């Protein structure tokens, strides 16, 4: 039990205040810049908000392919989130409730992948996505046979989503939650003649709602913020994501940067994940608290 003293409480509030400033100061600065006219110069933190916010937001909304990019980011983020949740739930369920050889070996093999981010395996993953049949053709070519299969997932939603849907973190968290579920529930389900999948859908899933909601928020933001992978696998303008769109508002030559439109685009790109956090805030907090229990 932590003893609350005035000094301890003051330190906690100080840490929270520093964290809030570190988080919201860049957002406020983006808001200030997005509200300035094109002629504004030498903007700093002391610059007051201008009167051009809605005009700049409207210009950013109708500029280039922002609406299409927002759609692509939404599809990608939801696809990654759904894929990670489904695979992680089923993996954790199998590892926790089924007894088979090398069960823990499988768990630790999944857990070790936490040390292998996408950037580490980016080259082989790209090679597979560029031609899904490449592993098969490579094996067959050892026998001197050239089957000439070529199936590319570049510039497709499947190419954006599938390589990113495995999640050791979510699998680990669901496994830890399943371990604290009373064994009596599983035994009662067996007595009632419930199949393993019925036990999973009727008992475990309803009990896991708060954990699923908490992970949904985290995984959605993870999928939304992806930059390197979409940059590699998308070459067509109608498949780029909004994060890439924001980066491309910056000129590559010596032209002047319209920072007000860049920041307005950034604010629009921030809106969907902020909306997800706001709508699922209560479930997110409850999920984190339940994990601590």
Image (spheres, rainbow, N blue to C red):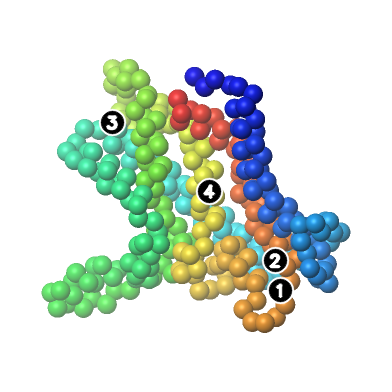
**Identity of the residue drawn at 35% across and 62% down:** 121
Residue at numbered disc 2: 262
Measured Cα–Cα span from mark 4 to mark 1: 30 Å
| Front of the two marks 1 and 3 | 1
Q: Residue 44 appears in which quarter of the rendering?
A: bottom right
- From the viewer's side, name the closer residue of 249 and 275: 249
Residue contact between numbered discs 1 and 2, judged by CB atoms under 8 Å = yes
Find residue 291 and name its label.
none
Measured Cα–Cα span from mark 1 to mark 3: 57 Å
Residue at numbered disc 1: 257
- From the viewer's side, name the closer residue of 82 and 7: 7
Decide which of tag 1 and tag 2 comes sooner along the chain. 1
Decide which of tag 4 and tag 3 comes sooner along the chain. 3
* Crowd band around label 3 with a 10 angstrom C-alpha radius: few (<14), some (14–19), many (20+): some
Image position, residue 91 (x, y; %): 33, 41
The image shows residue 62, relative to residue 251, as above or below, that is above
| Front of the two marks 4 and 1 | 1
View extreme (bottom): residue: 254
Decide which of tag 4 and tag 1 comes sooner along the chain. 4
* Crowd band around label 2 with a 10 angstrom C-alpha radius: few (<14), some (14–19), many (20+): many
């Amino acid at each position: 039990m932590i003893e609350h003293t005035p000094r301890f409480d003051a330190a906690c509030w100080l840490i929270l205040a520093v964290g809030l400033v570190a988080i919201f100061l860049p957002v406020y600065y983006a808001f200030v810049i997005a509200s300035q006219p094109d002629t504004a110069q030498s903007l700093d933190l002391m610059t007051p908000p201008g009167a051009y916010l809605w005009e700049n937001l409207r210009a950013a909304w109708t500029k280039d392919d922002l609406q299409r990019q927002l759609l692509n980011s939404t599809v990608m983020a939801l696809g990654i989130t759904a894929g990670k949740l489904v695979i992680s739930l089923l993996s954790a369920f199998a590892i926790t409730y089924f007894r088979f050889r090398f069960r823990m070996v499988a768990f630790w093999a999944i857990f070790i992948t936490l040390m292998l981010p996408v950037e580490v395996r980016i080259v082989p993953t790209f090679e597979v996505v560029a031609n899904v049949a490449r592993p098969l053709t490579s094996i067959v070519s050892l026998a001197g046979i050239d089957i000439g299969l070529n199936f590319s997932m570049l510039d497709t939603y499947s190419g954006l989503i599938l390589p990113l849907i495995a999640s050791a973190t979510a699998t680990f968290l669901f496994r830890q939650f399943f371990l604290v579920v009373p064994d009596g529930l599983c035994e009662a389900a067996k007595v009632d003649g419930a199949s393993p999948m019925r036990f999973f859908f009727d008992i475990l899933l309803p009990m896991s709602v708060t954990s699923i909601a908490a992970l949904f928020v985290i995984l959605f933001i993870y999928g939304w913020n992806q930059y390197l992978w979409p940059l590699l696998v998308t070459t067509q303008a109608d498949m780029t994501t909004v994060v890439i769109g924001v980066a491309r508002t910056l000129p590559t030559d010596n032209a002047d940067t319209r920072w007000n439109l860049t920041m307005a685009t950034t604010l629009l790109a921030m809106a969907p994940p902020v909306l997800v956090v706001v709508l699922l805030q209560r479930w997110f907090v409850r999920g984190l608290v339940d994990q601590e229990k």
